[in-house]
Amino acid sequence: METLKIERIRGIKGEFTPPPDKSVTHRALILAAMADGLSLIHNPLISFDTETTMDVLRALGVAVLCEGDRLLKVLSGGYKTFKSSENLPLYCANSGTTARLIMGMLAPRGMYAVLDGDDSLRGRPMQRVITPLSKMGADLQSAGNICGGSMPVYIKPASMFPAGVKGDVPSAQVKSAVLLAGTQLDGITSYTERLKTRDHTEALMPLFGADININDLTVSVSGGYPLTAAALTVPGDISSAAFIIAAALIFDNSEITVRSVGINPTRSAFLEIIRKWGADISIDNMKSGAEPTADITVRSSFLTGGVIEKDLTQKAIDELPLLGMLGMFTQNGVEIRNAEELRFKECDRIAAIVNNLRELGADAQDSGNTFTVTPYNKKNIKSDAGLRSFGDHRISMINVLLAKRFGLNILSGDINYINVSFPGFLEQLSGLEVT
Ligand code: S3P
């Protein structure tokens, strides 16, 4: 396999605007498709994952037009006008968010549909969405048997009803599926979760006229009304910004300001955690709104490390492998607990990060729901380490950071996965490098 030699860099400096938020873009597209009229999505993320959602919506008869990469126009007659797709199945590629949210959106529509995905998505659990939607009368069947039910998933016409649903797994995608179905059903549907997950769906739904009520861990929607078109601006993606922030932390001579990044409290525990570890970080220009934003300045820092568990684990779910990698550069190492959900992402992210860090010569342990990484010893680092992406965009970006830190070869084919969430990552990082 072809490899790419990545040279060591001394640090990064300058200003950086992160790519727009992936989770928010998916939701904005789906809500706009469910709404009647012309919606405008400013600053959308255009990446493999969000293009997947656009293609699925187009297959259902919704017009999605990209005006450059700064504006998406979505024209729809509302959720009652979706057409049965002629090009079955609806292909969700690598995107779990597309698959699970579209299931919720389509389950009450009284139509047949099949959802499928790539090998990675076919290996991810879908029963977690099928079970709560079935409690609301949906007729969904999975043809795969990973974790009790996986892709492809068949949706059949069913007479659904509103219900009070309790979440078994902490998942914003499951919560969102229930709310997207509930808003189409006469009456009140509520979803109660055990741990607060990212709240973008319930934050955006009122912009489209949905009647949402939030009471601690319970979100209710009073449904049966049409949704109406809206205009919104997508904030910068904290999960992508985290890679640049982490780079500033682990390279000497670094100072970076990240502009207009989303700091939704259900998503931004990464900042809270690194600050607790001693990161030199300041947060300015805070702007409120359905999705609050701020500018974040971070400098090379001495990090203590520590334990991440419970709520913090959930609120930093997509940043945990990166925080694990940062453990190598801390004084005491890191221990990440209650991280079982990481096993069900684009790959088993605990196994992937532990494998790669060990391959590199660092000390990392995988023990069930917990993984630990201890501070690295320079003399153990292997310059010929074979880091692998496991087909996962976030693991691939971590490998790039490690390669730039130690000067390593990485697999050229692995770079492509980064386009799932952060097109232009390598170029942007290079533009910030101090040589
Ligand atoms: C997401 C929710 C999280 C997250 C994923 C995006 C979303 O997944 O890991 O990257 O947009 O709702 P879960 O819902 O499985 O926790």
Image (cartoon, rainbow, N blue to C red):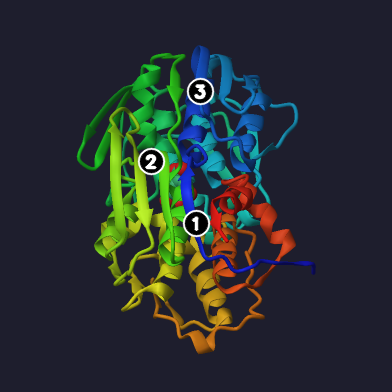
- 10 Å neighbourhood of mark 3: few (<14), some, or many (≥20)? many
- Give the residue drawn at x 39%, y 33%: 201
> Separation of disc 1 and disc 3 at Cα?
31 Å
> Separation of disc 2 and disc 1 at Cα?
38 Å
| Front residue (pair 309, 430) | 430
Q: Residue furthest left?
A: 215
Which amino acid is tagged 1? Answer: Ile
| Disc on the earlier residue, 2 or 3 | 3
Secondary structure of the residue carrying numbered label 2: helix
Residue 209 point in image, percent of width and height? 36, 16
Which amino acid is tagged 2? Answer: Lys
Identify residue for label 2.
175
Which amino acid is tagged 3? Answer: Ile
Q: Is residue 171 left or right of residue 284?
A: right
Secondary structure of the residue carrying numbered label 1: strand
Q: Is residue 272 above or below residue 184?
A: below
Residue 106 point in image, percent of width and height? 54, 30
Identify residue for label 3.
41
Can you say which quadrant of the picture contains the C terminus?
bottom right
| Front residue (pair 78, 426) | 426
Which disc number belongs to residue 12?
1
Residue 423 point in image, percent of width and height? 62, 44
**Can the viewer see residue 281 in this picture?**
yes
> Separation of disc 2 and disc 3 at Cα?
23 Å
**Label 3 near label 2: C-beta < 8 Å?**
no
Which picture quadrant has residue 112?
Answer: top right
| Nearer mark to the viewer, of 1 and 3 | 1
Q: Is mark 1 within 8 Å of ligand 1?
A: no
| Disc on the earlier residue, 2 or 1 | 1
Q: Is mark 2 within 8 Å of ligand 1?
A: yes
